[in-house]
Image (tube, rainbow, N blue to C red):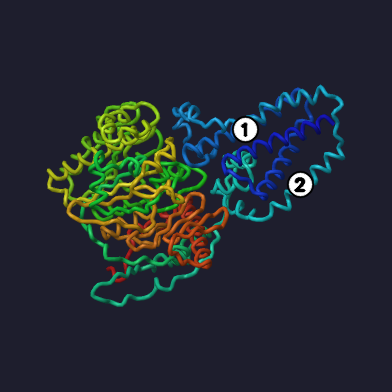
């Protein structure tokens, strides 16, 4: 009977871990979620109690304590990951490349919020309570009473678990949904199983053929219609034996072909410099302190409603989304598994097809991501990182301006048409402690913003170094006579990590960061010195950058292959990692099936449901496309054939 007591105590401790985690992570607890957690924790406690019942009391106590401690530590780590990197982690992601960030473990631990350690409380109280129970021999509990209590809890759990359970089953890539519906203890065992068991799921979506794609174009003096010769693609579809590839074919062929617009070809034949700027944020943009960024924002095309969703793998997956306009995986670092894929439909691949020399430069190495291999998959001719460049390594990340100085002669002096992709690093955290470029411009900042918090000043100091990078490039291009014929585009991989979200909101004056998802807004700027741009207020995201840029350069591409849309067509939608979406009408919250409209929105419930289904299908197909290396099987889509082409 004492074994029954241990099972009850084990159940109480497991439930406490779930409840503590849930209340910290989600602030409130739903009736349905509580029911599911009861069900799962009873099942886990019963299983462990049965297994440990074959041992003596000492071993039973020790192993019960270890189980509770492991679950508590796991819950703590997940909370800190979510706080620090905006995403929950998986063992699969850690197995893929977690060792690459091992040097930041101590930094991770020392910045944890104190109340995250409450998840360890059940392990701390388990042993003294168990000792008390062992010593008090009068405490009894009958099998009959225990069975009645467990049966009632199980019945309650089954009754409240049915609604929305399909959301968990259908969203194995969406950690927020799984954890919100089943609890952290259940997620641990699902997470462990994902290392050893590959969940094969068939791709099933409803496909409606778009007849507009088959219409012949009515020739006019200025036509915006894109028409492609799909004959080979359709033959391959008919002959395809793989059901997943067949579904991807059918889905992509059914999508509408986005038209051209007045911006098509505006920069045709120009050079292009594309910047992934580490942690670029409005908080660092200042008219006096970052005059080059400010000038580009005011005189170029400034997309003021641009969002940078955070996916499972921070910078790596954000880069993947921008380079390819595909949705990354939700459960692991996409970039770790695609180095051998055919990714020539990327923005770099499209420029290469158009006859451009293609380059990638980075002021770090392959420690975090295998950029030297990814660059080949994207179709980049020349890749150089810190191992190839004479850049001094300093504490708190290297100089962006020095990266420009050491690389610009490679293309400015030798190429007539170039595509250059810069991956910067100076603006990477830390901001809460001393670093070389975090302190470098503090004197100048103190003259302008003496009352700003030190962490914000350090962030601005790092931003000023990127501003110097732009200044160096502009000067070099101007001296070579190539400035007017070069387009700059820069965007952030994510908002600054490990800095107070209150700071990010409070010290941003350019856009409203207090609106829902305003924290995820990040500047996208396209600038040409000889052209006058304007502010674009259309909602858009990282995924929309490729279609927008390649349309400006009028490159040969098929819009059906990409998740994003041309921002100048004003029909984009932002897709967040947790399934939420945003468009010009408002924000859809996936977990609660709620729509928050913006002012003057007249969207209907039917339209919301249609968009939600489109988003789900797009995410499923995008991830299946990556997992099956689809463009190795349909490589000709990288350079699509237009109707009436020879």
Q: Is the N terminus in the top left, top right, bottom left or bottom right quadrant? A: top right
Q: Which label belongs to residue 135?
A: none
Q: Is the C terminus in the top left, top right, bottom left or bottom right quadrant? A: bottom left
Return the x and y of residue 504 as percentages of the image width and height: 40, 41
Q: Looking at the image, is mark 2 or mark 1 earlier in the sequence?
A: 1
Return the x and y of residue 9 as percentages of the image width and height: 75, 32
Residue positioned 39% across, 42% down in the render: 506
Label 2 packing within 10 angstroms: few (<14), some (14-19), many (20+): some
Residue for badge 1: 72
Residue for badge 2: 154
Return the x and y of residue 27 as percentages of the image width and height: 58, 43
Label 1 packing within 10 angstroms: few (<14), some (14-19), many (20+): many
Q: Is residue 336 left or right of residue 195?
A: left
Residue positioned 59% across, 34% down in the render: 74
User: Residue placed farthest to the front in the image?
Assistant: 451
Q: Is residue 166 left or right of residue 299?
A: right
Quadrant assignment, res 121: top right
Q: Nearer the viewer, residue 631 or 253?
A: 253
Helix, strand or loop status at disc 1: helix
Q: Nearer the viewer, residue 44 or 635?
A: 44
Residue positioned 24% across, 56% down in the render: 533
Helix, strand or loop status at disc 2: helix
The number of numbered badges drawn on the structure is: 2
Q: Nearer the viewer, residue 208 or 198?
A: 208
Return the x and y of residue 176 as percentages of the image width and height: 55, 46
Alpha-carbon span between mark 2 and mark 1: 23 Å
Instruction: Check the image and report above or below for 410 versus 266.
Output: above
Instruction: Check the image and report above or below for 83 versus 646.
Output: above
């Amino acid at each position: 009977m004492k074994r029954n007591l241990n099972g009850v105590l084990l159940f109480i401790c497991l439930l406490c871990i779930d409840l503590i985690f849930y209340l910290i992570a989600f602030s409130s607890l739903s009736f349905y979620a509580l029911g599911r957690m009861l069900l799962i924790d009873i099942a886990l406690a019963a299983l462990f109690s049965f297994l440990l019942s074959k041992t003596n009391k000492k071993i039973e106590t020790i192993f019960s304590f270890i189980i509770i401690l492991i679950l508590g530590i796991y819950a703590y780590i997940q909370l800190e990951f979510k706080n620090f990197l905006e995403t929950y982690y998986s063992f699969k992601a850690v197995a893929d490349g977690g060792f690459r960030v091992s040097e930041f473990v101590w930094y991770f631990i020392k910045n944890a919020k104190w109340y995250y350690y409450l998840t360890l409380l059940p392990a701390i109280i388990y042993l003294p309570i168990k000792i008390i129970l062992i010593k008090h021999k009068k405490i009894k509990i009958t099998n009959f009473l225990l069975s009645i209590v467990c049966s009632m809890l199980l019945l309650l759990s089954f009754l409240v678990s049915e609604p929305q359970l399909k959301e968990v089953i259908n969203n194995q890539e969406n950690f927020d949904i799984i954890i919100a519906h089943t609890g952290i203890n259940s997620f641990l065992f699902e997470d462990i199983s994902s290392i050893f068991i590959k969940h094969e799921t068939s791709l099933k979506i409803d496909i409606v053929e778009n007849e507009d794609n088959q219409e012949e174009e009515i020739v006019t003096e200025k036509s915006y219609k894109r028409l492609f010769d799909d004959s080979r693609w359709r033959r391959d579809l008919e002959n395809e034996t793989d059901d997943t590839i067949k579904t991807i074919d059918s889905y992509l062929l059914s999508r509408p072909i986005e038209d051209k617009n007045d911006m098509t070809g505006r920069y045709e034949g120009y050079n292009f410099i594309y910047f992934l700027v580490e942690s670029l944020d409005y908080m660092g943009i200042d008219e006096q302190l970052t005059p080059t960024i400010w000038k580009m924002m005011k005189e170029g095309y400034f997309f003021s409603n641009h969002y940078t969703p955070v996916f499972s793998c921070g910078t790596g997956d954000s880069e993947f989304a921008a380079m390819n306009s595909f949705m990354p995986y939700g459960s692991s670092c996409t970039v770790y598994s695609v180095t051998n894929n055919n990714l020539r439909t990327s923005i770099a691949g499209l420029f290469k097809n158009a006859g451009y020399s293609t380059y990638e430069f980075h002021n770090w190495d392959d420690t975090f991501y295998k950029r030297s291999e990814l660059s080949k998959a994207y179709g980049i001719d020349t890749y150089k990182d810190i191992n190839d460049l004479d850049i001094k390594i300093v504490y708190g990340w290297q100089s962006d301006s020095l990266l420009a100085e050491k690389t610009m002669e490679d293309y400015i002096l030798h190429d007539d048409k170039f595509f250059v992709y810069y991956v910067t690093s100076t603006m990477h955290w830390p901001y809460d402690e001393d670093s070389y470029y975090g302190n470098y411009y503090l004197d100048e900042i103190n003259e302008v913003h003496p009352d700003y918090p030190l962490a914000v000043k350090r962030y601005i100091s790092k931003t000023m170094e990127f501003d110097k990078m732009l200044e160096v490039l502009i000067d070099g291009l101007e001296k070579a006579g190539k400035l007017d014929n070069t387009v700059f585009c820069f965007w952030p991989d994510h908002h600054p990590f490990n800095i107070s979200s209150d700071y990010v909101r409070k010290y941003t004056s350019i856009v409203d960061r207090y609106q829902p998802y305003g924290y995820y807004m990040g500047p996208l700027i396209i600038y040409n010195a000889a052209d006058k741009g304007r502010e674009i207020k259309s909602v858009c995201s990282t995924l929309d950058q490729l279609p927008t840029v390649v349309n400006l350069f009028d490159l040969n591409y098929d819009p059906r292959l990409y998740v994003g849309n041309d921002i100048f067509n004003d029909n984009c939608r932002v897709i967040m990692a947790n399934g939420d979406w945003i468009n010009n009408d408002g924000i859809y919250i996936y977990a609660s099936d709620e729509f928050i409209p913006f002012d003057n929105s007249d969207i209907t419930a039917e339209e919301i449901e249609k968009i939600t289904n489109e988003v789900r299908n797009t995410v499923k197909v995008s991830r299946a496309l990556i997992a099956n290396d689809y463009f190795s099987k349909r490589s000709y889509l990288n350079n699509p054939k237009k109707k009436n082409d020879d």
